[in-house]
Amino acid sequence: MTASTVLRRLLQALPTLFGVVLIIFVLLRVVPGDPISMMVTGESTPDDIARLRRAYGLDQPIPMQFALYLAALARGDFGTSITMKQDVLGLVLQRLPATLELALCAFVLATTTGMLAGLAAVRWRRHWPEAAVEGASAVALAIPEFLWALILVLALSVALPLFPSSGRVDPVVATAFHTQFYLLESLVTLQPHLAAELLSHLALPALALAIPLAAIIARVLRTALLEAMRQDYMLLAQVKGLSPNAALLRHALPNALIPTVTVAGVQVVLLLGGTVLVELIFAYPGLGNMLYRAAVNRDLPVIQGVTMVFSVLFVLLNLAVDLSYALLDPRIRQA
């Protein structure tokens, strides 16, 4: 995939982003409730309320508000939080690394576990590993992420106090860094004690997000591998004398990865949405937690800013999935 193709895909995503911004903007303004009412006290006068509405542009018609919002976005201005009185872009950038770390850890854990389980189910087909993978994946998919979060807290934080039940890192540990990417920096600079502390806070929320995703990857990979093993090239590989393990890894797996990557890419997009409740349960200071609290307080600029960031991440993830096809299949690269 050439640079021009990537650029064309990014330009094609602009209407999608515009549609998301438009829908969220209109919905937030037509639902019942007034965010200004949460800012005023009983002593506020009608003039005070009108002044606040003018300050946040809520006194204008919705089309005018939308035009002003688009003009502000073009300047990189996401607005000011109604409840926190801070720049929304600064708040988003402050919380974004935590959510990215959580999503990345969950994706790595889900991908590793799901692929190993799918391979085991095919390699030992009609034996107990296949039955174990099928049963475990059915249970994993039957329970949503937020319920897994509660189960993990009760099991591994309350009953067995092995992991902390809330927070991102210990404040003392956090002061040792100058950036927001605490986990990445500790791993790169080879500080095992800091990495262990940070991973302990990430373990339960990442596991809660990873369990359903791992089950989906295992099932899709198993189905794709079984389909690949029925193809003629697998018979040819066996005729050439390749062992079952070698044929599975060298021939069946590369062909089975394309549908698996497709499904995994879609699920990763949903994984970002699942961080909202999981971050809330674990008091994890990420974008999902901030989005929930902004929704409760009807903090319109924060909701719009977080939604915009999530939309951009969704577009980039879809583009990454498309790029991975070219890496997995030489025919797509040549086309």
Image (cartoon, rainbow, N blue to C red):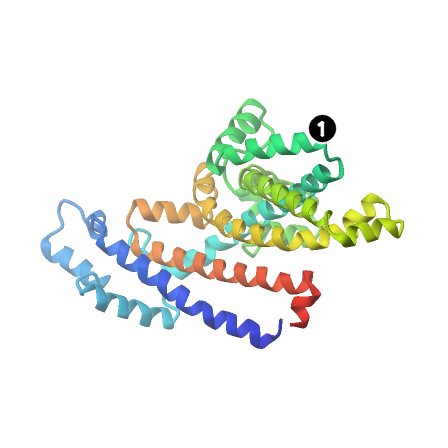
Residue at x 62%, y 50% (from the top left corner): 260
Would you say residue 305 is visible in this rendering? yes
Residue 268 in percent (x, y) is at 53, 50
Q: Is residue 36 above or below residue 70?
A: above
Residue at x 54%, y 37% (from the top left corner): 208
> Pointer 1: residues within 10 angstroms few (<14), some, or many (20+)?
few
Q: Nearer the viewer, residue 153 or 43?
A: 153
Query: Extreme front residue here?
Result: 232
- Which quadrant: the C terminus? bottom right
- Which quadrant: the N terminus? bottom right
Residue 14 in percent (x, y) is at 42, 69
Q: Nearer the viewer, residue 227 or 37?
A: 227
Q: Which secondary structure lies at badge 1?
A: helix
Residue 288 in percent (x, y) is at 43, 47
Describe residue 214's horizontal placement relative to residue 271 as left or right. right
Q: Is residue 7 above or below residue 239?
A: below
Identity, as a three-letter code, of the amino acid under mark 1 = Trp
Q: To which residue does mark 1 refer?
A: 128
